Image (cartoon, rainbow, N blue to C red):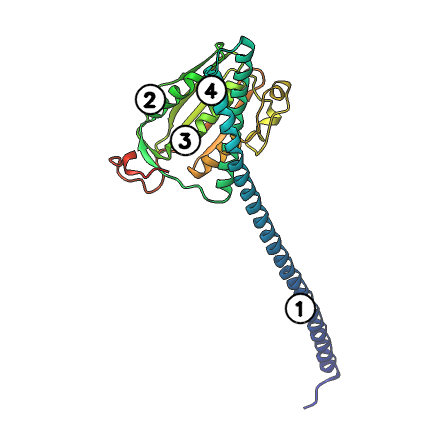
């Protein structure tokens, strides 16, 4: 049985369509293979950039660490000599000399704090910071901070107040790193509060978190600068800020330490009316032992 001319034409048409589809599929395969080669090349380039970035980060951390260690010796020597002068071991000082020695002591202390911040940031970036949690009472931590700052309150127009923690159970976290964050907050608040009050408080949030806050009646921060205050080397561009020394490392360190403790930081501020820097942490880090475990059970860092 022979096929009709109409059937032959239909078969020819289908063959042509099939050939066109095969040609289009081949073209798509070539384009896909070319795209895959491009993706592979892009991944290789990204891997190279990641390796280079990691190497640069390691070099930066190593440089900061070495530099911080090298700075500590001369800074400590300056502080020791200034302390001897202040104690008038070699004879009495004039009023002007006392003022100059006090300036040296203040500058050396700020320099030492900057070196410590640099070293801590370098350790965090290098992943060499360990968390040493323990059970402790918040009232004890506030008491220690109060005693620490009492001799540092040189401005008689500023008061430092610690609210008694209410409805707070014992915390299980690294109290040394928590103390370091709060110390930076308080130091920052005292520096930028010409007169008024700096207030430290802690309150419970829900069942498993606690909010720490350091509020001041200082110069405040404009809205456009608030998002960047926790960045490395960030400083607010204002006349008052320019008069006061600082590296912008303290708040960046607070953010990194808070992350290590499973928390977060933030700021609420109004220009000319003061600021509130806050920290939210879990009441307990994961795998907390029973509250019977105390600092005595924890090895010293």
Between tags 2 and 3, which lies in front?
3
Between tags 1 and 3, which lies in front?
3
Residue 29 disc label? 1
Residue 72 disc label? none
Which residue is the extreme one toward the left? 292
Residue at disc 2, secondary structure: loop
Check disc 2: other Cα within 10 Å, few if <14, some if 14-19, many if 20+: few
Residue 102, percent from left and from top = 52, 16
Residue at disc 4, secondary structure: helix
Between tags 1 and 2, which lies in front?
2
Q: Are marks 1 and 2 in contact (CB under 8 Å)?
A: no
Residue at disc 1, secondary structure: helix
The mark that comes first in sequence, 2 or 3, is 2
Position of the N terminus by quadrant: bottom right
Residue 84 disc label? 4
Residue at disc 3, secondary structure: helix
Residue 178 disc label? 3
Residue 275 shows in the view: no
């Amino acid at each position: 049985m022979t096929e009709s001319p109409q059937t032959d034409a239909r078969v020819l048409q289908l063959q042509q369509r099939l050939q066109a589809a095969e040609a289009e599929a081949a073209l798509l395969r070539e384009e896909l293979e070319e795209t895959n080669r491009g993706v592979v090349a892009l991944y290789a380039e990204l891997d190279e950039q990641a390796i280079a970035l990691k190497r640069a980060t390691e070099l930066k951390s190593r440089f900061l660490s070495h530099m911080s260690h090298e700075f500590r010796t001369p800074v400590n020597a300056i502080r020791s000599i200034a302390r001897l002068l202040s104690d008038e071991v070699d004879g009495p000082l004039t009023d002007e000399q006392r003022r100059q020695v006090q300036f040296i002591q203040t500058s050396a202390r700020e320099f030492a704090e900057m070196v410590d911040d640099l070293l801590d940031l370098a350790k965090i970036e290098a992943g060499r910071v360990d968390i040493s949690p323990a059970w402790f009472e918040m009232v004890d931590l506030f008491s220690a901070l109060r005693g620490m700052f009492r001799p540092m309150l040189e401005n008689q127009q500023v008061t430092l107040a610690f609210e008694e923690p209410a409805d707070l159970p014992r915390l299980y976290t690294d109290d040394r790193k928590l103390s370091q964050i709060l110390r930076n907050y308080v130091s920052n608040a005292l520096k930028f509060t010409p007169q008024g009050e700096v207030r430290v408080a802690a309150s419970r949030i829900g069942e498993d978190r606690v909010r720490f806050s350091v509020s001041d009646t200082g110069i405040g921060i404009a809205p456009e600068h608030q998002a960047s205050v926790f960045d490395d080397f960030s400083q607010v561009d204002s006349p008052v800020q320019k008069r006061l020394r600082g590296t912008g490392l303290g708040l960046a360190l607070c953010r990194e330490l808070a992350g290590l403790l499973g928390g977060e930081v933030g700021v609420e501020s109004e220009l000319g009316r003061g600021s509130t820097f806050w920290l939210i942490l879990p009441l307990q880090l994961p795998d907390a032992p029973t509250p019977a475990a105390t600092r005595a059970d924890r090895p010293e860092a």
